[in-house]
Image: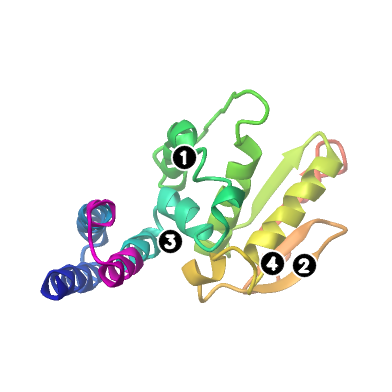
Amino acid sequence: AKQEFEAYQDYFDIVRHLGKENKAKSYEYNMWLRGQTEKKLKSQIEPTEFLKFYELYKKTFLYAAQDDFYSYCIYLEWNRAIEKRFFQHRAKALKPIVNGLQDMADGRLDLLAVSMPPGTGKTGLAIFYLTWLAGKRPDLPVLGGSHSNSFLQGVYEECMRVIQPDGEYLWNDVFPTSKIVKTNAKDMKIDINNARRFSTLQFSSIGSGNAGK
């Protein structure tokens, strides 16, 4: 059993090394390893072996999280109590939206329109997406808009909760070189790494004077 785990661990080390030359291929192999470790966790193995495979399974999500939005959504809440996790309980229903948002981030889509009933997780997923983009591309500003200023205030505060270091989310694990440098609760602005005229994240209600934003 020990040798078997070491083989999986060696495979993961090779996957990471391959990522320096061919990231797409390394992610493909990482997904295979994720599936294999998941199978091991569902089989009858000793508790010590279970913990080793569990940690390796976790690493497959962290490895891909900067570029794969689904992996990010899962890993972000890894340390939260299961009953408090937003995405895990909705993953199957939200997967088509996750795929669409991935296509937008990768440049395969210019526009994504989502229409779903209230309470299905649209806003929560949008918050995850905004914080993912903020970590991936802190120098590219994102402007969020809505008719309701109070709604946006809630989105701003939740983004802050996700990004804050030492919080219940693992955003800083995924983006260890990205840090909050400036915030403005009144204007709902968050700057990552550098303060700039156009903030990494900014929120503004429609009709509130958006010239220059």
Q: Position of residue 1 (x, y in %)?
A: 14, 70
Question: Magenta stretch?
Answer: 39-55
Going from N to C along the chain, the mark reached first, 3 or 1, is 3
Going from N to C along the chain, the mark reached first, 1 or 2, is 1
Circles 1 and 2, Cβ within 8 Å, touching? The answer is no
Q: Is residue 187 visible?
A: yes
Disc 1 marks which residue? 91
Disc 2 marks which residue? 183
Q: Give the residue type at disc 2.
A: Thr
Q: Give the residue type at disc 3.
A: Gln
Q: CA distance from mark 4 to mark 2?
A: 6 Å
Q: CA distance from mark 3 to mark 1?
A: 18 Å
* Mark nearer the viewer, 1 or 4: 1
Majority secondary structure in the magenta region: helix
Q: Secondary structure at mark 4?
A: strand
Tag 1: Cα neighbours inside 10 Å, few (<14), some, or many (≥20)?
A: some
Tag 3: Cα neighbours inside 10 Å, few (<14), some, or many (≥20)?
A: some
Circles 1 and 4, Cβ within 8 Å, touching? The answer is no
Out of 208 and 8, give the one closest to the viewer.
8
Tag 4: Cα neighbours inside 10 Å, few (<14), some, or many (≥20)?
A: many
Quadrant assignment, res 26: bottom left
Establish if 114 lies above or below 197. above
Disc 3 marks which residue? 66
Q: Does residue 15 belong to the magenta stretch?
A: no
Disc 4 marks which residue? 191
Q: Is 186 positioned to the left or the right of 15 in the image? A: right
Q: Secondary structure at mark 3?
A: loop
Quadrant assignment, res 169: bottom right
Q: CA distance from mark 3 to mark 4?
A: 19 Å
Going from N to C along the chain, the mark reached first, 3 or 2, is 3
Q: Secondary structure at mark 2?
A: strand
